[in-house]
Amino acid sequence: MSSTPHTGGIWTRLVAIAMALVGLLLIVGGIYSLCVGGPLYYLLSGLGILLSAFYLFKRHPIALAIYAIVLFGTIIWALCVVGLDFWSLVPRLDVVLIIGVVLLLPFVRRPLAANHLATGPLGLGVVLAALALIVSAFMDPHNINGSLPTEHVNASPANPENVPDNDWPAYARTQDGNHWSPLDQINTQNVNKLKVAWIMRTGDVLDKSRDPGEATNEATPLEFDNTLYFCSLHQKVFAVDAVTGKTKWVFDPKINVNPTFQHLTCRGVSAHTTPANALDSDGQPVATTDCAKRIIAMVNDGRIVEIDAQTGQVCHGFGKDGQVDLRFSHQPYTTIGEYAPTSPPVVTDKLIIVNSAVRDNGSVQQPSGATRAYDVYTGKLVWVFDAANPDPNEMPSEEHPHFHPNSPNSWSVSSYDKALNIVYIPMGVGTPDQWGGYRDKDAERYPPGIIALNADTGKLVWSYQTVHHDLWDMDVSAQPNLVDITQKDGSLVPAIYVPTKSGDIFVLDRRTGTPIVPVAEKPAPGGAATGDYTSPTQPHSELNLRPKNPLSDRDMWGATILDQMVCSIYFHSLRYEGPYTPPSTQGTLVFPGDLGMFEWGGLAVDPRREVAFTNPISIPFVSTLVPRGPGNPRWPDPNQKKAGSGGETGIQPNYGIPYAINLHPFLDPLLLKIGLPVPCRMPPWGEIAGIDMRTNKVVWRHRNGTLRDSLHGSALPIPLPPIKIGVPSLGGPLATAGNLAFLTSAQDYYIRAYDMTTGHVIWKDRLPAGAQSSPMTYRINGRQYIVTYAGGHGSFLSKMGDYLIAYALPEDDNKK
């Protein structure tokens, strides 16, 4: 006589089928893992889950005992590998724990007629796994607690540019790169009262029909004469009333842009005030009635434009009708989009010192990255520093009309010491970046690193190289910090702090380039691609935020055990021997990656306390050399128009060398297939850190930012819970004398205020878009304002916008 199966039996078998699927996936992945040198765990756990599923399908109680063994084994494995690190435990325990809970549900286990001897061990395993997650949620092995010193050891920091306390007339307030203000009306006691004072919108928004993917709003405004000056996405320059946010004037340079550009970026503008009895570089008197105060703006199609700060009209005496064309001026190649000035220049009393981004990984026939100085009044070329030229100061002539092609460039912001009359330029390597077999010895002399030049002549004062024979795009991307550091005997040493992508901060005497903090040359991996070579050693500074240990299987992450396994397999399939593993055809894991640990945001420094605040990021990249072959020619079809790549990731052509290059972040391949860009490396992916510059120690370090906006721009653009995990940021901090640091550039859309002593968040506010920029501050009529530009970042996948937002205390709270 047949009987109808019990409903519970149906559920039991459905669970068994699901478990079998999980087990089979782990077995297949586990075999693959063993083949590439990964751990044995995935295969063993897959076999255990499959065996448990088999007996569960047969409704035999031994299924629970077998699964209990799997669960206990998983707990032991996970704790041995990652310890009580919550975010690393989650993917190793979540699926296995959920299956354990499901097996204990009455309608699943009832058909097994299991007694307590069968369910007890499984229940204990579930409790222990849950307990491990709960306990680890209250612990963070990545967190460092501490307190920065609060005393003012340097009560009167040098101010050779005589910048008034209330103003912000340069990108970092002064050209020392410190992003610090002496204002303290807003402080740790009242910052929680900050409110929006006004919002200004530019109306300059993304145009997908003509803009590249790397379309970004990164500007930090200037402020003087009660007016803010800044640039928008298409390099329009705005003058805005600093009290009301009302627009005074707009200058549109009418940029010529198309989707092949690698960058559409403006980090800010510069300013110059004509002094009394001014002379130009030829010693001729300068009229002070025309453009007495001028704004210098860089345009990504290769131009400098000067604008009268009062009227918004061009300064006609500068260049031709107020502009100098950098792209056609002495450049060996002039394809539009391959030479793009993106950062505000250094401005001295008489000169504009100009650097520019040169398209990465295009070909061996790229524009020069030569640094140039132009007369601020006339636009005349005064000096040149062309790093690949045997004589870097050689001026263009009839015999040599062009700069050196592919010469190393500087795309970030330089710093200037007026007292020493030295400009400090952060250098990047010449393109192509990941294969250096064709570079000559002159092109390898300086980059990447810092070159210190006499600001009047461009003559080299000193240079310091931060990576030897760079094959990893380790440009010095942050503006250097010029800080006078107090010694034990009370004397001051003029130092320069050089944050780098590698996570090293090189601390040098800025007069000579001599290291103040020890630097060790450590062995580096060899085995470069055919035709190339590697340096046997690389420099490592004692002051650094780089990971203490090379990446290993414990660092591999995922949302579940399945994609964690996929990331582990991916990791073991790549070439990786620690930092500076050379690019390869196999695919090389580069960590710190192309974004580096320090991007262009750099450090914010309080020069009175001699402490620094920064926001390092930790996203590995994959660099794969692609040998020439069908579909990958050494040179493009001459009948096709040469054009830029339109981005810095994906396949880059590298025309003229033996390899193209495929560059991309090290992302979870499983989740990427459904359009979710999640790193394969465990979090935190973004942190904040406090540095005592007298001891050169990292005193505190915390995760920064939440998951809330991490899926914006993905295939599933939904808000996530605001869980603090540590997300990447792109932009820099602001420090003030109110013991505060402000940061807006994290992947979630917040402006945050931090107690600079401890790094703890003490205020935040939601922003309407991504703010991958650096905030600034000023004071007018006794009221201090904090301003940030929330415009979004195309390649960072943050929400685009056009918002300039000012915060201030309520009127009644303004006491200073």
Image (spheres, rainbow, N blue to C red):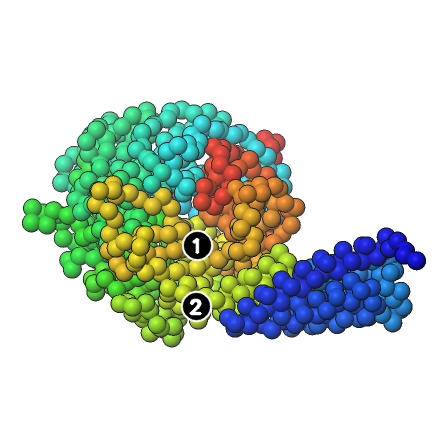
Vertical arrangement, residue 434 with respect to residue 334, above or below: below
The residue located at (48%, 28%) in the rendering is 201
- Give the camera-side residue of 233 and 486: 233
Vertical arrangement, residue 376 with respect to residue 59, above or below: above
Mark 2 or mark 1: whose residue is earlier in sequence:
2
Question: What number is the disc on residue 664?
Answer: 1
The residue located at (53%, 69%) in the rendering is 552
- Residue type beneath disc 2: Arg
Question: What number is the disc on residue 380?
Answer: none
Residue 489 position in % (x across, y down): 42, 68
Q: Quadrant of the N terminus?
A: bottom right
Left or right position of 141 against 452: right
- Residue type beneath disc 1: His
Residue 147 position in % (x across, y down): 58, 60
Q: Which residue lies furthest to the front in this view?
A: 1
Q: How crowded is mark 1: few (under 14 residues within 10 Å), some or many (20 or more)?
A: some
Q: Can residue 355 be seen in this view?
A: yes
Q: Do the residues labelled 2 and 1 touch (CB within 8 Å)?
A: no
- Give the camera-side residue of 237 and 711: 711
Left or right position of 797 against 563: left
Left or right position of 599 against 22: left
Q: Can residue 377 be seen in this view?
A: no
Question: What number is the disc on residue 575?
Answer: 2
Left or right position of 222 against 673: left
Q: In which quarter of the image is the C terminus?
A: top right
Q: Which residue lies furthest to the left in this view?
A: 399
The residue located at (80%, 58%) in the rendering is 12
